Image: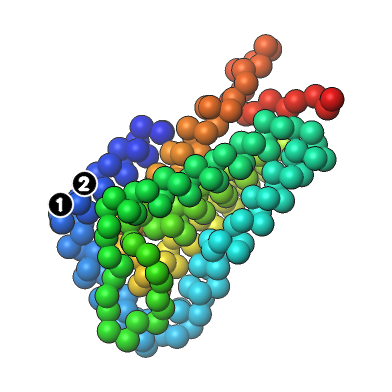
Amino acid sequence: MMGLLLGLFGVLLIDVWIGGPLSKLDGNVATRMNRVDVSHPLIVDAARWATVLGSTPVLVPMVFATSLYSLLVQHRRRQGLFVIATAVGGLIVNNAIKLVVGRNRPAVANAVAHAAGKSFPSGHAMNSAVIYGALLVVAMWNVRVPRRRWALTAGALLLVGLIAASRVVLVVHYITDVVAGVSLGAALVIISVKAFTRPSITSHRIWIEPESPR
């Protein structure tokens, strides 16, 4: 899975870098989406609400609350550090790639929304995939019922998908920006899980093992 996600990101990165066919399609989609926005303000309002869920004021408190709860209440240092390291690592990687690629955001007439910084990959999409993905890992460790695990996974996927789609609807990102952000973000979560995994003596679970309170 990690290889497929990184491969998808690599294809999108190369296409954006050379101005390939997907990049050209991006421009057409942005122009058409902007026309829809002008005529359908309710769609824009819905996108604004969704995009907030992937914003810094929402994601940062989630990271701090989850990590502090793991560290101070549950006494699971590895679990708390996993959340922090994954979130910070995703932020650093996103900003570094934005700087290197330097892709400008969509430019349309009568834009319904504006955003600063470069476009590829989408920070909202990538940070949402990283942070909600990390929180999903922590939740899955604590939940043993398969049905609940499926529900949590579906909820996280839906949430990240809505946030990513909202950036395209608001025409502050291209489709390739958000797909690249989600794919790279998910890959980073998998990499982080592998880095923080402590193998169990009795099983081969991939989830982070708890640490005994001192």
CB of mark 2 within 8 Å of CB of mark 1? Answer: yes
Residue, disc 2? 14
In the rendered image, which residue does mark 1 sit on?
A: 18
Residue at image position (41%, 71%) is 115
Residue at left offset 57%, top offset 39%: 85
> What is the x, y in percent for residue 170?
40, 74
**Residue occupying the point 26% across, 48% down:** 13
Residue 180: x, y in percent? 35, 50
- Secondary structure of the residue carrying numbered label 2: helix
Task: Please give left or right for residue 170 compared with residue 131 in the image.
Answer: left
Name the residue rendered at 48%, 83% in the picture: 42
Q: CA distance from mark 2 to mark 1?
A: 6 Å
Q: How many marks?
A: 2
Whether residue 146 appears in this view of the structure is: no
Residue 2: percent from the left, percent from the top?
41, 33
**Residue 202 lies in what quarter of the image?**
top right
> Can I make out residue 50 in this image?
yes
Residue type highlighted by circle 1: Ile
In this rendering, is residue 79 above or below 211?
below
Q: Secondary structure at mark 1?
A: helix
Q: Is residue 76 above or below residue 46?
A: above
Q: Is residue 91 above or below residue 110?
A: above
